[in-house]
Amino acid sequence: MKNIKFFPFIILFALAACNQQTQSESSELAVPVSVEDIRLQSIEQFVSTTGTVNATSEVTLNSEMAGDYFLQTNPATGRPFKLGDRVSKGQTIIRFENEEYVNNLAIDAVKLNLEISEQEYDKQKSLYEKGGVTLRELRNSEVSKTNAQYNYENAQIQMAKMSVSAPFSGVIVELPYYTNGVRIASGAQMATIMSYSQMYMSINLPEKNIGELQLGQEVLVTNYTLPEDTLRGKVTEMSPAISTETRTFSGRIDINNSDLKLRPGMFVKADVITARKDSTIVIPKDVILSGNRGKYVFIVGRNSAADDRRITTGLENQDFVEVIEGLSVNDRLIIKGFETLRDDSKVRIIR
């Protein structure tokens, strides 16, 4: 009789335990996911290419005469010029000494002859105005003065060859070593200077992209050694012709490198911005799935259940996609854990 009396309580206890187990199993079946609230953003569409950047100005300076070599002191450092030093336009980097060369130019005598010729011309001009000489005599005097002027200027040009000077402001990127005072032959390489505050890169793109590129389009330039820095450039040249061999067309991108972050010869990636939209729905590209009915993503719907949404996309780049239809602002997009979800799957948000 005692066993029969406690039987209902045993049944109730068993039912309660079963219910707790069912709730526990239901809770365990909820898929853990991470979500992101959808908001309006901007997106840019690119045509990407790679290439080598080059300095816009580059020159290799050679000796134009034979002479004794003397590397000059950099006034900015107080030491002889070296690789990496910046130089200003007209600054002398190397000087040559050659007494025989200077004596042959006889520049002092040439200058004196110019002064005499100028004085003679002034005298003849004054006499001509008073009727003291003929026009022919005045013209002959003028010819002598002009020849003397040319001779003096040519001598100055020849004297300038005794100095190796920077034709523009830039950086010394090559400076072959010579011992001061040694005789250097004419035509020897002295230094290479580059100015790379502005740079350029030549590009070759597939034929299919020729309708997307236009002159003046902005370009984002990156290098793997400078992952945090993005430089800006522009498309400045573009050939209308397609190569019959490679089926590509060529162009040029000019790059603003005012901080000298890029160095000549670096290999870079260039993203030409071909389209841009502001204030639109943008989602990560890797959360989009494809099915029989097209592209879709999962959002968190009612009762913490996954809701698959068919979407229509617009602009896209390597990482992001614009969504034209299918999503709304503030929808909770599932960005992790979506791979095994089905429509109405229970989810548990773990931000």
Image (spheres, rainbow, N blue to C red):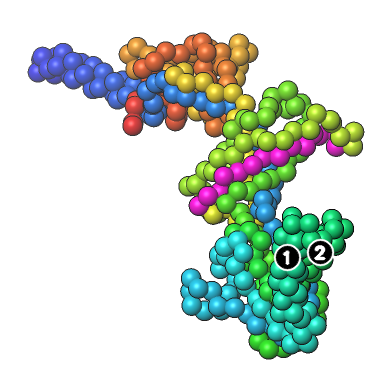
Asked which secondary structure carries label 1, the reply is helix
Disc 1 target residue:
123
Seen at 32% across and 13% down, the residue is: 303
Seen at 42% across and 13% down, the residue is: 328
Which kind of residue does numbered mark 2 sit on? Ser
Callout 2 crowding tier (Cα within 10 Å): few <14, some 14–19, many ≥20: many
Numbered label tally: 2
State if disc 2 and disc 1 touch (CB < 8 Å): yes
Disc 2 target residue:
141
> In which quadrant of the rendered view does residue 3 lie?
top left
Asked which secondary structure carries label 2, the reply is helix
For the C terminus, the image quarter is: top left
Q: Which residues are magenta?
A: 246-259
Of residues 268 and 179, the one nearer the viewer is: 179
Q: Is residue 243 visible?
A: yes
Q: CA distance from mark 1 to mark 2?
A: 9 Å
Q: Is residue 346 visible?
A: no
Majority secondary structure in the magenta region? strand
Which kind of residue does numbered mark 1 sit on? Lys
Callout 1 crowding tier (Cα within 10 Å): few <14, some 14–19, many ≥20: few
The x, y position of residue 225, in whole percent, is 55, 54
The x, y position of residue 91, in whole percent, is 59, 67
Q: Which mark is residue 185?
A: none
The x, y position of residue 231, in whole percent, is 54, 43
Q: Nearer the viewer, mark 1 or mark 2?
A: 1
